[in-house]
Amino acid sequence: MKAVTVNNIKKRYGAKKPFVSALEGVSFEVEKGELFGIIGPDGAGKTSLFRILTTLLLADGGNVMVDGLDVVKNYKDIRERVGYMPGRFSLYQDLTVRENLEFFATIFNTSIEANYDLVKDIYSQIEPFKDRKAGKLSGGMKQKLALSCALIHRPSVLFLDEPTTGVDAVSRKEFWEMLKKLRSQGITILVSTPYMDEAGLCDRVALIQAGKIMSVDTPEGIVSAFGKKLLAVKSDSMLHLLNELKACPDVEDAYPFGEYHHAVMKQGGQKELNNYLLRSGKAFELKEVTPDIEDCFMALMKN
Amino acid sequence: MRTLKFLLQKEFRQIFRDPSILRIIFVMPMIQLLILPWAADYEVKDINLSVVDHDHSDYSRQLISKITASGYFRLRDYTASCPSALRDIEKDNADLILEIPASFEKQLVKEDAATLFMAVNAINGTKANLGGAYLKSIIQDYNREVRTEWIQFPRFSPETTIEVTSSNWFNPLMNYKYFMVPGILVILVTMVGSFLAALNIVKEKEVGTIEQINVTPVRKYQFILGKLIPFWVLGLLILSIGLLISRVAYGIVPAGSFLTIYVFASVYLLAVLGLGLLVSTFTSTQQQAMLISFFMIMVFILLGGLYTSIDSMPEWAQAITKVNPVSYFIDVMRMVVLKGSSLTDIKYHLLTVLGFAIFFNGWAVFSYRKRS
């Protein structure tokens, strides 16, 4: 049995004609105990998808099974066994850290003590502030508290909607370490993120754009499916260089990428591009690079 | 049941941790009950009067001193020119002008009849109306005095006269505070019962905490009950504080039993809580809920019979008061406090408000279900 099965999910907003289509037939499966990433830019439909998976929103079409249960028919049972951490901090800001955790434990008919081993690693970091009101915590600490509250009833599937958005680089890294530990406890984790560099930290990822899944694979699999030569170019006049790259008949796509421009080659390789750029007579630096998830995402978006 | 207990525990914790709610609960009733009844005074006093006396006779002076001696009027100006009196009205220095014609005394003596002219500044409607009426009755009184002075009435009056004496039942001294204070108290209970509850529910939506609650096994009815019960309790608490204040500050002891008041208030709070719940289902931010509440409280107060008598409203307005739960509670409070009505006397009110409670809560739960 898969932990999550999503089959041809559709969701539209607005009743009248110019409606917004948030999800257009999304399908994927998540194995038990997997750390599954849903990666896409803002507005791709990630939050809509998560709200459907956590029984907060009804889909217009398709069906979803979470932990072997239908999200529409068995929503009550699903709510007992999933954990959800919304993108926006939504715990009670006027209750203390301890009170929040206690509250969420008790409404799931359990106690902090019973599941302390599961949240210990995370909660111990904020325990020194347990009498502080949740609203007075820093962003990173809020995140840890929210994760603790989502975990306190030992869910079998954990949904994290953009947990690392607006969190500093160190806390992000820590957060992913925590997720890895949770996975080793046998919890299936679905995490959405707009950051492409986090894709490599997942077991498998789904790339989503404009309500459609473009690819579902392991991060390595997605990169190896890129299949084209990728070159990085740098010069003193970057804008001029980009125009030049786009004009080159051998270049399929060119886009800025950090301090370099990336050029996806239709045919040929480093030598051909080198010759092409030499004609303009300006100095440049050219090297071959291995594509990462962002390059793959750009390539998939073009198709 | 266990879940509900924890929800209530959380709710009370939040309420008693919020200093602004505490202030609303304890300070607002005190200020409103201690200050407002003094300001909401029905008696019109200190009406500014300008007298234009063209006569300067004995009789005219007698009339003027009678008017000023009544205590209701303040003589602002005593002139012999009409334009200067009119200027007083324009400058809002005078509310009334009384013009005494030049031949007032002569006509009164010779022809047994005289005319007076009265002009009323109608910008302040109540003051103008009542002032005019007061002045008229004083002049009539004066008229009678003049007649008794001249004509020796026979022992038994040849013409039938009907004399009316009135006595005020249930409020012998016509102390308006006795009926204003219970009314203001009703408004307070209503505000806490419905609007505080509505704001509280909407806050969960606005902050997003309802999202987190919705993915837990907490049932909708548990969530709603967890919200309604605390404010039901708070409403009764405010009522008790208010009754205590009216006892201590105004010496108002209900003629009827407290039980009657509390039984009715418990049912009434269910109705207004339902209304609050309804507001919360139709709004998504506290600001929206606040503005709707402002609108409703205005309707409640002006069409609830607090300041103006419902019987003197036009018929369509009276029809609206029939669907205003506040008007029933104000009525009941006055009946119980002043008249000592018992539960059987107010059973019609009680049943109607129970109907409101079922209607509002039913509607709120229905639309809650539809939206989620």
Image (cartoon, coloured by chain):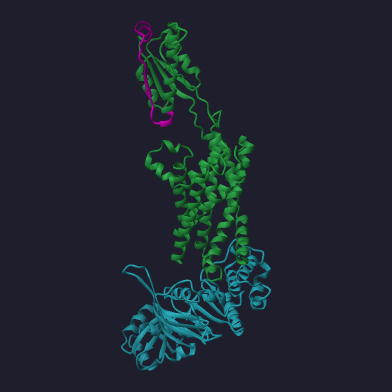
**Image quarter of the N terminus of chain B:** bottom right
Residue at figure coordinates x 42%, y 73% from the top left:
A43
Q: Position of residue B265 (x, y in %)?
A: 56, 48
Is residue A191 found left or right of A141 in the rendered image?
left
Out of B120 and A164, give the one closest to the viewer.
B120
Is residue A48 found left or right of B181 in the rendered image?
left
Relative height, residue A16 to residue B174 (above, below): below
Q: Position of residue B79 (x, y in %)?
A: 40, 15
Task: Note whether residue B76 is visible.
Answer: yes
Query: Is B119 part of what is drawn in magenta?
Result: yes
Which chain did the renderer colour cyan?
A
Out of A61 and B353, give the one closest to the viewer.
B353
The residue segment tinted magenta is B104-128
Task: Note whether residue A290 is visible.
Answer: no
Residue at figure coordinates x 55%, y 34% from the top left:
B177
Relative height, residue A222 to residue B367 (above, below): below
Relative height, residue A88 to residue B350 (above, below): below
Q: Position of residue A177 (x, y in %)?
A: 59, 81
Query: Is B20 part of what is drawn in magenta?
Result: no
What's the colour of chain B in the image?
Answer: green
Is residue B292 found left or right of A92 in the rendered image?
left
Out of B357 and A264, give the one closest to the viewer.
B357
Q: Position of residue B161 (x, y in %)?
A: 43, 16
Residue at figure coordinates x 47%, y 59% from the top left:
B362
* Residue A236 picture quarter: bottom left
* Residue B141 picture quarter: top left
Counting labels gives: 0
Out of A279 and B371, give the one closest to the viewer.
B371
